Image (tube, rainbow, N blue to C red):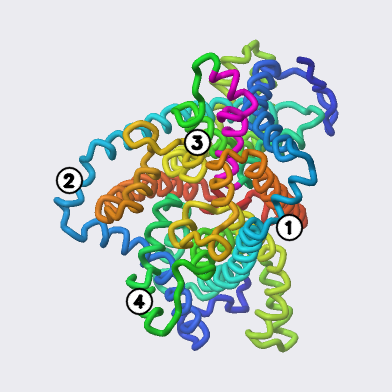
Amino acid sequence: MRVALAAGRRPRTPAIIPGALPAFGLTLFWVGLLVLLPLAALAERPWENGAPWLLATLTTPRTLAALRLSFGCALCAAAVTTLLGLLLAWVLERVRPPGWRMLDALIDLPFALPTAVAGITLATLYAPTGWIGAPLAGLGFRIAGTPVGIGVALVFVGLPFVVRTVLPVLRDLPGELEEAAATLGARRGQIALRVLLPALFPALATGFGLAFARGVGEYGSVIFIAGNKPMVSEIAPLLIVIRLSEDDYAGAAGIGLLMLVTAALCLMLVTLLRRRLPAMRGVAG
Amino acid sequence: MSGALQTRSGIGTLSGLALTLAAWAVVTLLLILPVGILFAQALRQGLDAALTALSDDDVLAAIRLSALVVALVVPINTICGLFAAYALTKFDFPGRAALLVLIELPLSVSPVVAGLVWVLLFGRHGWFGPFLAAHGVRMVFTLPGILLATLFVTFPFVTRTVMPVMEAQGRQHEEAATMLGAGFVSLFWRVTLPETGAALVSGVLLCAARSLGEFGAVSVVSGHIPGLTETVPLRIEALYNGYETVAAFALAAVLAVASGLIVGMRGLIEWRRGRPAGESN
């Protein structure tokens, strides 16, 4: 394998550091076997019965319902998560109540809880007999087994993404911004709405994008609370599993490819956004 | 922050108090109660019932399998991830951006798709399935399939955490060591690796936590054979769906504690490195 080592941006003595061959060899082998080969299969398999067939399977009512549900729930949940995340980040950084360190540590709970564990606890909590589900059922609201339940699970897994994206940006906003606004006579509320919120927008959008990308494909924390009724609360990842169990590889791969492309586009947008925000490099992504 | 302007309101102001209460309400409903119910359900019939449920043969087999998966996946992805980070930061080469995208890609893939790809390759009707079947090799619904799915899901973690540190180190140390006659092995082992230190440990812990708790990807390739191809999360699912609530939640509590310890350790390390602990997983 020949690697053009001299093609750097900086003028430097080329190829002085040893180990190019083993490092690149192992890396390419690793990436090739674990990423390229599987992706090639995912890209090729959907088309094996022809494009018209693929279009037809992807537009059956059941598949459309699952895709609409997954994308719709992820979108709504990401919006709610962004609002709640902003609230938590704001309280942590700008209010600093007593016990904020505890609050800060609790935010990362969803990162620590494996998805299957989150799934069964949320399902039990929001079931009609659960701690939260029972009072809500008394009021006539059903959470488990409905798209709302899926949304609850997605807000749970998405929350730390938003908080961890917004918090550092909020912390690093230059104080001069607010000082200038204050000397010009702005009140606190005005400063928050007209000065801080616009400055936070890229971070909020990034958090939204991350939560959405995660939510579209989320499986473990959702399937227990969702109830999985076809056409009502059956998410797209579950439909992939069902297609596979029917030995319909092409159909399963078609849904998978569609979800992968959407998530990749979403994260590409996030990366572009992040480039515009130097303060955010190295934060969640 | 500015000296003149008070940017932190505390809970002295009405809005500060209201926002704080709202924040705690969100955290309680969404984060604290699930953990509360996890332990409440696990201990519903007392500690003895929970421990009895945990000493079931299939549960023990699942714990053994999960431990084996972590023990195999973490070293492979750590070594390959380190080499990839070395290649990406110490050399300039065309296609670097593309390689980075490929390495990060598994992060944006649904866990189910991460399992699906292996069935597409090695399943009964997969690309290599018939060939392997003819030679008596089974990849899907066996340990190799579970390993591949877990490797895929935890693929980028080490590279991602180590790369910024290697990038910041620059190349002077490696160049100096090379001038002094160090070969690749001693250079890598004695110069590059020690400098990655805490970041490497952090990446390894992230990889371990995820491979321990992975559900979706493993679920697709496992075949769910109790005692044979069920990892701990899959066993939890089987118990829960079989209405063995105490056993399901007891095992879930054990998994949550193990995962929480790993993630907590990582948080401590990140905190001492002076970085925000939260990073995607």
Is residue A172 at least partly visible in the picture?
no
Neighbourhood count class around disc 4 (C-alpha, 10 Å): few under 14, some 14–19, many 20 upward = some
Q: Are marks 4 and 1 in contact (CB under 8 Å)?
A: no
Marks 1 & 3 on one chain:
no
Classed neighbour count for the residue bearing mark 3: other residues with Cα under 10 Å, few (<14), some (14–19), many (≥20): many
Q: Badge 4 is on which residue?
A: A134
Distance (Cα) linking label 4 and label 3: 36 Å
Disc sitting over residue B221 in the figure: 3
Do tags 4 and 1 sit on the same chain? yes
Which quadrant of the figure has residue B72? Answer: top left
Cα distance in 3D space between marks 4 and 2: 30 Å
Q: What is the three-letter code of the residue carrying label 3? A: Val
Could you tell me residue B168's position as x and y percent? Answer: 66, 38
Q: CA distance from mark 1 to mark 3?
A: 40 Å
Q: Helix, strand, or loop for circle 4?
A: helix
Describe the element under mark 3 as helix, strand or loop: helix
- Three-letter amino acid code of the residue under disc 4: Ala
Q: Amino acid at mark 1?
A: Leu
Q: Are marks 4 and 2 in contact (CB under 8 Å)?
A: no
Q: Between residues A139 and A80, which one lies in front from this camera angle? A: A139
Residue B241 is covered by the magenta coloring: no
Q: Position of residue A105 (x, y in %)?
A: 43, 60
**Residue under circle 1?**
A277
